[in-house]
Image (cartoon, rainbow, N blue to C red):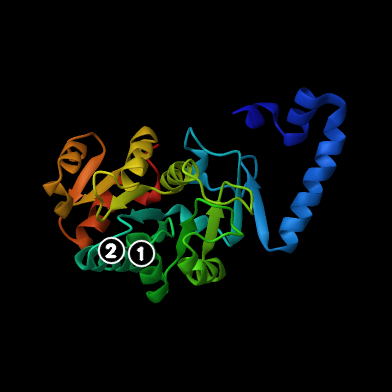
Amino acid sequence: MELEDAGSATALLERDHGLLADELVRAALEDLERWEDQGIQVYTVLDPRYPANLRAAVDRPALIFVVGEYQPSDARSVAVIGSRSASEDGLALARAVVEELVDTSYTVVSGLAAGVDAAAHAAALARRGRTIAVIGTGVRRAYPAENAALQRRIAAEGAVISQFLPDAGPSRRSFPKRNAVMSGLTLATVVIEASSTSGARTQLRFARAQKRPVLLAGSLLDQAWAREMAEQPGAYVFASPGEVVSLLDELCPGGAPLG
């Protein structure tokens, strides 16, 4: 990554913009001060606070915006994702999986979407566990709007993370990028319920590229795409919520990512 090779943002600006570097640095500092006043933290990949799991991913963003508090213990984290139009059985499974994860000190990460994502966040909060939302907009935006209150609560009790400028709105390209960060941030991705067109499948592609395990609910195997995925290296099928934790403890001993 160019920023890491240069050693600092200032060195990179001086290399690429010469005499304009001082002006650009002043503007950046003004932005940083304004964001800090709004409760928004900025972690660059050179910052020791930058999440260790994400730093290990080849497609990590140069910086992330954080509202709330990312803790070192959040490295022991798992993404729980699935359909926006989940069935009642799917939502119940999401809650049960999250309860098992929280009870074994995993941080639950999801994307704040409707359906499985929102159920996963809410279940973690109800269990008094840690949860992190990785969103496809800037941290000053909420999408979907009906999850704005949930986003505020996650920020107050956990963390909300985005790679986009704070006021950035949603776009077709932003959500796949969000999935890459969510996968990179976590030790593994658990898919509860998803169709052949679900955005969850995008995250599975990133997880495989990042060499992070993928755990599929057994109920997904009635779909051809899931049966095909289950045969790939790094993919595992679970039959019960408790089996999720057993698989994670086997695949990520000591909470260390495989990437």
Q: Residues within 10 Å of mark 1 (few under 14, many from 20)?
A: many
Please give the name of the residue rendered at 37% of the width and 60% of the height, measured from the top-left corner: 117
- Specify whether residue 165 is in view: yes
Which picture quadrant has residue 118?
bottom left
Location of residue 88 by image quarter: bottom left
Residue 159 or 104: which is nearer the viewer?
Answer: 159
Residue on which the image places disc 1: 120
Q: Residue at x 40, y 65 (%)?
A: 121
Taking depth in this image into account, of 160 and 241 the one nearest to the observer is 160
Q: Quadrant of residue 110?
A: bottom left
* Coordinates of residue 42 in the picture (x, y in percent): 66, 51
At 15% across and 56% down in the image, what residue appears?
239
Q: CA distance from mark 1 to mark 2?
A: 6 Å
Mark 2 residue type: Ala
**The N terminus lies in quadrant:** top right
Image coordinates for residue 205, horizontal then vertical, percent? 34, 37
Q: Is residue 38 left or right of residue 205?
A: right
Percent x, y of residue 22:
86, 35
